[in-house]
Every structure is written in C-alpha cells, then in structure tokens.
Amino acid sequence: MKQHVYNTALYLRLSRDDEEYGDSVSIETQRTILQQYAKENRLHVVDEYVDDGWSGTNFDRPDFKRMMNDVDSGKINCIVTKDLSRFGREHIQMDYYLEFDFPERGIRYIAVTDNEDTDKGLSDFVPFKNLFNEWFAKDTSRKVKAAFKAKFAKGQRIFAYAPIGYRKDPDNKNHLLIDEETRWIIDKIYDLAYHGAGAAKICKILTQEQIPTASWLNFQRYGTFAHIFEDQPESKRYAWTIAQVKSILKDETYIGNSVHYRETNISYKNKRRIRKDPSEWVKIENTHEAIISRDVFDRVQEQITTRRRSMKDQTTQIFSGLVKCADCGWSMRFATNKTVSRPFSYFTCSRYGQGTGLCSNHYVRYDVLYSYVLSRLRFWIAAVHQDEQAVINRLLQSSNREQEARDKRVIAEKKRAEKRLSDLDNLLAKLYEDRVSEIITARNFSMLSQKYQEEQEQLEAKITALNSQLETAREQVVNTEKWVDLVRQYTDLNELTADVLNGMIEKILIHEAVKDGEGNRVQEIEIFYRFVGNIDQLSKPVSLTA
C-alpha cells in the first residue's frame, strides 16, 4: 500500500509569560521534541515556524500566519506542535481549527506530548484541554498584573530601555540611575522650554546641533535598533521629532516619579494597546533621583498648556493663552477687523462674545497692547543691566520693612514655642520619675501626662506653621533673584515673540476702559511677570490713554 506523504510544518511558540517555566517549554526544547518525533515517524519537514515572544490567546502571530498561508497554497498538509497550548490558548478558535477547518481541508494536526493526532481521532478531552489552556492564560495574566502592581508599589519600574538621561541600576534592574553622559541632553531640552521655546523649535535646535537621539545612543551602547540605522545617512542619528520632544517634556520620570498604567491591553486575549484616561494612571513619587526640579517641570507644563497656536492665515498669535479679562478671568478672543481700509487686530472678552451679558467688552487693540508690553519689558531689561541689585532691592523694598518686622515676631514666637517644647520634655521625664518613685498617684500621672502631651502636639503644629511663614518670606527673595536672572538674558528687545512672552510673562489682565475727566479713553493693563507678579506699579502708573 502506498504511504501518504505528509509535508510537515513544525510550529514552535513561546510567550514572555511562559519563560518563567524554564527549559521545559523553551524554543530549543520544543525544537528537539518535534524534530525527534518527525524523524521517528518519517514525516517530511518542509519548514519550521517560530513565534518567540507571542501570546497564544490570539492567532495574529507572524509565523503562524506564514504557516497558514503555506497551508492555503498546498505546501503544508501536516502541522506538529509540542502540545495543544503551543498552537493556541483560545478554546473557541482551537475547536474551530481541530473540529472543522483541518478535517475539511485534510490537514493532519499532531500535539506530541498531549498524544493527540487528528488522523487517529482526537480524544474526548481535547475541548476540556483547550478550555484549561485558555483559563491558564487568563490566570497567568492576572498573576502577572498582580506582580507588576506589587513592584510598582515598591517604587520599581518595568522597562526594556532606560529613558534618555538615565541608565539601569546594575544592582537592581527595576531601578533607574542618572546617566551622567546623557543627562545634559535632558537639561538642555528643559532649559530651552523653560525659556519659552516650543517643541518644534527645540527639535530644530537639537537636530542642527547634532545631538544624538535616544535610539542612536541605545544602538551605540547595546547594538539595538540596528535596522533603523543600517544604510542610513549620518543625519539619521540626530533626527529628532516633535513627538519625542513633547514626550520628554511631559514625562514625570525626570522629576523622580514613576507613572504606570498609562496604556493597557484590550484584554488578555487581545494584546492591542489602548491609552487609558489620566484619571486611571498610577503615580509613585520619588522612586529615583530627579534630573529636573519640580519648579522647572511645573513651569514647562504651564508653557505647554498656554502655547501659542497658528492662525488660519499661517500667522502666529503671539499673545495666545496670556491675555485674560480682568473681571471674569476668561481668555480674551483675538480677531481682526477687515471691514476698514486699514485692517487692525484686537482682543475682546470671549465670555462677553458669547452674548450672555455676564461680562463687558474689555476691548483693546493689538498694536496698543503690543507697544505697551514691549515698553515694559524693555524698561526692566534696561533696569537690570544698569543695576540689578537696585532692581532686587526695589522689588523687595515695598514689603521689606513690614516683612522684617513680621519675621522678627515669627522668630521670637518660634523660639518661645521651642523652649516650651523642651521644658515639656523635661517635665514629662520628671513626671515619669515621680510616678516610679510613687511620689504622685497613678491618677495624677495620667492626667498631667495627657495634658503635657496635648500641649506638645499643639506646639509642634504651631512651630510647623511658623516655619512655613518664614519659608514664604525666603521664597520671595529667591523668586526675585530668578526673575532678575531671566531678564539678564536679554541685552535689548526690539520686537516681541511668542518665546519671549511665554518665557517672561505669566498673564496679562485687561481692564475695561473708562473715560477720564477730560473725556479721554483710559485703560488699565496689568502684566504679571514670572516669579514676581505685577511689579509695574513700582516704576510707573499702569494705565493707557488710547
């Protein structure tokens, strides 16, 4: 009798979750078992199909699809796997292949260690085995998630590559250390953003200065991403994208935090990644050393949210996000009057523009606002370059005398509280000795010790509050120095740009215009500068006649 020729595919699969079970399911072990079986049973092996690192809960695997294409073309009529779970862990799809598809097309399927062979007839236990294999995948997924959650709670991270600026801790693969060779790149990116540069401008600077990307650095160190740089020009090494820059600027990794669960699989069967709502993210603070200070990070986030936008005519509205209505706090709406012979642009209250009657117009022309803001910035730039210490003194002097008097009172009150706290410690120690010596009764000891402890708690809370008051005063000095450092970067200013405005100004409040005694239109505009707030009243009146 002529023996049927089986053109055989040896299919091997290993998921990441399977790796913890060691060599028993490794690719090499599967290969040894399948090759030995094929040899002993005189199967003609056409090809091996290997999906290493792919889950069995769905069938969208590259080599599985290649194998099934070969089945469709008639190249393969027999498939051999180590066991049923290597073929797949989704019981409905497994049942479809084994009970309908393969028999209909005359495809023989063999699961070696499960002792299942469609030519000999599948056992009645196959549906239960498939169901168990799917349950196993679901249970493993649950356990992996629980393990990750426990690691995250301990401040550990799970990552293939450390973010640029960091490296893996050689003693703890789930911990980050600052990479002194690349942290300067992160410092540069945040410094540019801190001083008003947007992601597009930062991306351009990084590319022009030939600063290496994270993928190039990983390729240089570990040989990864070779396919990206193979046969590519040198410029590929410095090909930053706006998306990369934005990702770095929003990443709390750089202030020492770890944020988890930003993405998830649709289910344990469907591995497609979906973005989760920020409210579902889990943030663990202070898991590693920060590169960027919290103040710098917060300011950059503010810069991002108030970033200017391009207009329909491709121009840029440089005041976008900065101009607010002084009365209702809403943003001012930018528009252009093109019905006149000389078109001009202006701002009006966007809440008023809705026709609700809840606010008034607060109209101001763009050219008037531009001139006023430019003049104020030039004033402070000139003042700082002429005598920066005088500027610091001027910014502090308005409240210096009162602050000094308050500080003296706070310091004196703090010293009294600290002395009383020390006295209470001594009283409690003496009270304990008296009780041990039975000089006082247990009732009196309990009453007095409770009274002293309550007073201690009140004093500790008071000292904390007093320290906070003193710290606020110190912050005023620090913020003033920050403002002067910021202004010092400019030697002269001939025009306003979005970068300059976002870098130096926090917000601009537009008041409603009024008529003065002579019938002139007078309008107050308040500029709140970074770190120091509204300081223009220290130099000149802040009203415009327009």
Image (tube, rainbow, N blue to C red):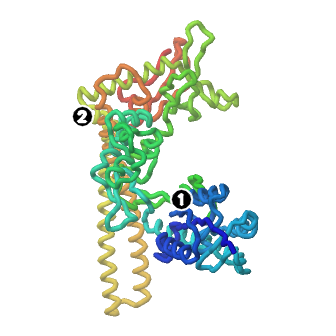
Q: Which mark is residue 413?
A: none
Q: Please state the horizontal and vertical placement of residue 39, each as a whole percent of the image.
A: 53, 74
Residue toward you, 199 or 327: 199
Which residue sits furthest front?
1
Q: Is residue 315 left or right of residue 288?
A: right
Q: Please state the horizontal and vertical placement of residue 174, each as a whole percent of the image.
A: 40, 65
Question: For the N terminus, which image quadrant?
Answer: bottom right
Q: Please state the horizontal and vertical placement of residue 229, each as a whole percent of the image.
A: 39, 44
Q: Please state the horizontal and vertical placement of residue 314, each as a whole percent of the image.
A: 53, 23
Q: Is residue 6 left or right of residue 546?
A: right
Badges 1 and 2: C-beta atoms under 8 Å apart? Answer: no
Which residue sits furthest bottom?
438
Q: In this rendering, does residue 360 appear at all?
A: yes
Image label count? 2
Seen in the picture, residue 359 relative to 107 is either above or below; the reply is above
**Which kind of residue does numbered mark 1 sit on?**
Tyr
User: What residue is pinned by disc 1?
Assistant: 261
How crowded pointer 2 is (Cα within 10 Å; few <14, some 14-19, many 20+) is rated as: some
Residue drawn at x 66%, y 77% as measured from the top left: 116
Q: Quadrant of residue 392?
A: top left
Seen in the picture, residue 333 relative to 1 is either above or below; the reply is above
Q: Nearer the viewer, mark 1 or mark 2?
A: 1
User: What residue is pinned by disc 2?
Assistant: 389
Residue drawn at x 74%, y 70% as measured from the top left: 99
Residue toward you, 467 or 211: 211
Q: CA distance from mark 1 to mark 2?
A: 49 Å
**Which kind of residue does numbered mark 2 sit on?**
Gln
Seen in the picture, residue 352 relative to 192 is either above or below; the reply is above
How crowded pointer 1 is (Cα within 10 Å; few <14, some 14-19, many 20+) is rated as: some
